[in-house]
Image (tube, rainbow, N blue to C red):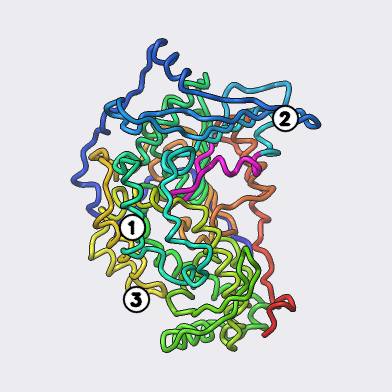
């Protein structure tokens, strides 16, 4: 299967039904935020930076790690200060470029500094520093986590809805003892990042993000466009993407496409000729009665019994499809025969990974104000109900947001970001959460952008895209990029049988 879609920004209306009328009442000006700093103010910012540089004995690679202090209340510039973790993976080559790469993590709620190992040997380091700054609320001394939402000693909880009111009411009580939860928006985090840039002495920078990290990148592009040389956005969540309203629609699209793809693939279609019927039968069976399944605990490796409901099955399938959709037909086929273990184990792994990656208190600080408050009952009915996933996720998260504190946002927050910055936008055709429609939406407002859709799911990569990214970073322009390698990109082969450990 070959899929290619490359588009230099075309000004068209995309998904009009989803956001018609959204922007009509918005103001045109952002809330005032500081853009210019005097030499004295920059010196003061530098004093807030505490870094220690180490050099690896064998490789000679240099890494600086430490913290940067910011006021929790940025507007008043008084009171409590919080400390963001900072990691700089210094450029290795003799010809070091002055413009580093700043990386924004997904979530919301992931601490980007935890990814330093992934960037240790990254190609960017040959000529540029790679800078990782923990977004406020995700790391340092201000991680807004709710451990009770994902306890390691309760595997069943990973097959239950994440957003449970009683759990987060208790978490809120604990977090409010130490933090002002109205101060953890994406806008404030973007301004933190700009101050880190100034304290480190960088001029223009390159930025990249995946998933929610693209929203952080877009907000930074809006608030500090003069500081950016290039932007790379992967699996785009623009301002029109209201988390988690579109999760059900995105999963429905990806699942339908995948089921069709399997039926059209000679080997997959032959191995699983009735896959759609099998999928529907699983949903019906689990709706009537949850299945008891034995799974292996991710840490203790003990065998644990869990109950798998229809809702848990669909949510776990959605997260499995972030990266492992080639296994999905086989998982469905085995589950239709009553062998739920392969699916449940894969679902546990994906849910465990995601939930323990995110600071869920910070996730709520961002999504309650920036997303859930913009979701109407009519949208829930139109976009979530009557799908495989249904409206349970968005309704539960909205219920938790009823008592969660809000940050103050600019009146024009929901308007699309439109700046003349070179932007390379990447989408995976089978992405179950940020499908290509959202990359198209972002690109339609960025006049200096290139949108590439390739086979893949959430957060695409590989040698071909790496070569395109290298060209983009080298030239600082989307014009003239050689994207011919995407002509031969194909999705991987479907997995048609399981390892022996998963046999019933």
How many numbered markers are drawn?
Answer: 3
Which residue has dot 2 on it?
61
Residue range highlighted in magenta: 103-119
Q: CA distance from mark 3 to mark 1?
A: 33 Å
| Real-space Cα separation, disc 1 to disc 2, in angstroms | 44 Å
**Mark nearer the viewer, 3 or 2:** 2
Q: Kindly identify the residue that appears in the image at 48 percent across and 18 percent down.
A: 46
Report which residue position mark 3 lands on: 386
206 up-or-down from 139: above or below = above
Choose the circle earlier in sequence order: 1 or 2: 2
Q: Would residue 224 be counted in the magenta stretch?
A: no
Name above or below for residue 188 compared with residue 15.
above
Q: Which of these two is toward me, 43 or 226?
A: 43
The residue indicated by pointer 1 is 170
Q: Position of residue 458 (x, y in %)?
A: 54, 56
Q: Between disc 3 and disc 2, whose residue precedes? A: 2
Residue at x 51% of width, y 30% of height: 67
Is 315 left, or right, of 66 in this rendering? left
Q: Residue 407 placed where, x, y %?
A: 28, 42
Determine if residue 329 is in view. Answer: no
Q: Quadrant of residue 27?
A: top left
Up/down of 372 relative to 450, above or below: below
Q: Is any part of residue 390 visible from this angle? A: yes
The residue located at (49%, 87%) in the rendering is 281
Instruction: Determine whether 484 is above or below 382 in the image.
Output: above
Residue 348 image-quadrant placement: bottom right
Task: Give the label, 3 or 1, closer to the camera.
Answer: 1
- Mark 3 or mark 1, earlier in chain: 1
Nearest the viewer among 290 and 204 is 290
């Amino acid at each position: 299967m070959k899929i290619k879609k490359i588009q230099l920004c075309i000004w068209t209306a995309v998904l009009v039904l989803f956001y018609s009328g959204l922007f009509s009442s918005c103001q045109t000006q952002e809330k005032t935020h500081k853009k210019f700093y005097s030499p004295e103010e920059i010196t003061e910012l530098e004093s807030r930076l505490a870094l220690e540089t180490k050099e690896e004995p064998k490789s000679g690679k240099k890494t600086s790690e430490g913290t940067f202090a910011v006021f929790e209340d940025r507007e008043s510039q008084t009171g409590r200060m919080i400390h963001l973790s900072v990691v700089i993976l210094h450029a290795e080559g003799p010809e070091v470029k002055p413009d580093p790469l700043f990386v924004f993590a997904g979530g919301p709620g992931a601490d980007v500094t935890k990814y330093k190992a992934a960037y240790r040997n990254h190609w960017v380091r040959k000529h540029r520093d790679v800078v990782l700054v923990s977004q406020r609320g995700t790391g340092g001394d201000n991680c807004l986590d709710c451990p009770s939402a994902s306890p390691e000693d309760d595997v069943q909880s990973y097959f239950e809805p994440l957003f449970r009111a009683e759990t987060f009411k208790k978490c809120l009580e604990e977090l409010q003892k130490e933090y002002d939860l109205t101060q953890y928006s994406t806008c404030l985090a973007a301004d933190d990042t700009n101050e880190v840039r100034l304290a480190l002495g960088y001029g223009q920078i390159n930025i990249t993000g995946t998933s929610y990290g693209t929203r952080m990148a877009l907000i930074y592009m809006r608030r500090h466009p003069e500081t950016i040389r290039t932007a790379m956005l992967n699996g785009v969540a623009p301002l029109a993407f209201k988390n988690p309203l579109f999760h059900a629609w995105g999963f429905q699209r990806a699942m339908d496409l995948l089921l069709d793809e399997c039926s059209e693939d000679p080997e997959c279609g032959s191995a699983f000729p009735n896959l759609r019927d099998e999928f529907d039968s699983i949903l019906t069976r689990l709706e009537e009665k949850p299945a008891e399944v034995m799974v292996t605990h991710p840490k203790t490796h003990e065998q644990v019994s869990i109950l798998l409901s229809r809702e848990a099955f669909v949510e776990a399938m959605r997260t499995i499809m972030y990266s492992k959709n080639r296994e999905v037909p086989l998982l469905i086929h085995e589950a239709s025969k009553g062998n739920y273990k392969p699916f449940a184990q894969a679902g546990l792994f994906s849910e465990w990974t995601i939930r323990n990656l995110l600071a869920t208190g910070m996730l709520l600080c961002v999504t309650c104000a920036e997303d859930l408050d913009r979701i109407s009952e009519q949208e829930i009915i139109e976009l979530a109900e009557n799908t495989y996933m249904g409206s349970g996720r968005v309704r539960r998260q909205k219920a938790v947001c009823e008592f969660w504190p809000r940050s103050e946002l600019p009146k024009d927050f929901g308007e699309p970001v439109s700046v003349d910055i070179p932007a390379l936008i990447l989408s995976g055709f089978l992405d179950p959460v940020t499908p290509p429609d959202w990359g198209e939406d972002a690109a339609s407002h960025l006049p200096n952008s290139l949108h590439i859709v390739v086979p893949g799911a959430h957060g695409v990569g590989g040698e071909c895209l790496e070569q395109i990214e290298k060209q983009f970073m080298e030239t600082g322009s989307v014009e003239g990029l050689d994207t011919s390698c995407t002509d031969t990109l194909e999705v991987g082969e479907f997995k048609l049988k399981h390892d022996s450990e998963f046999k019933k």
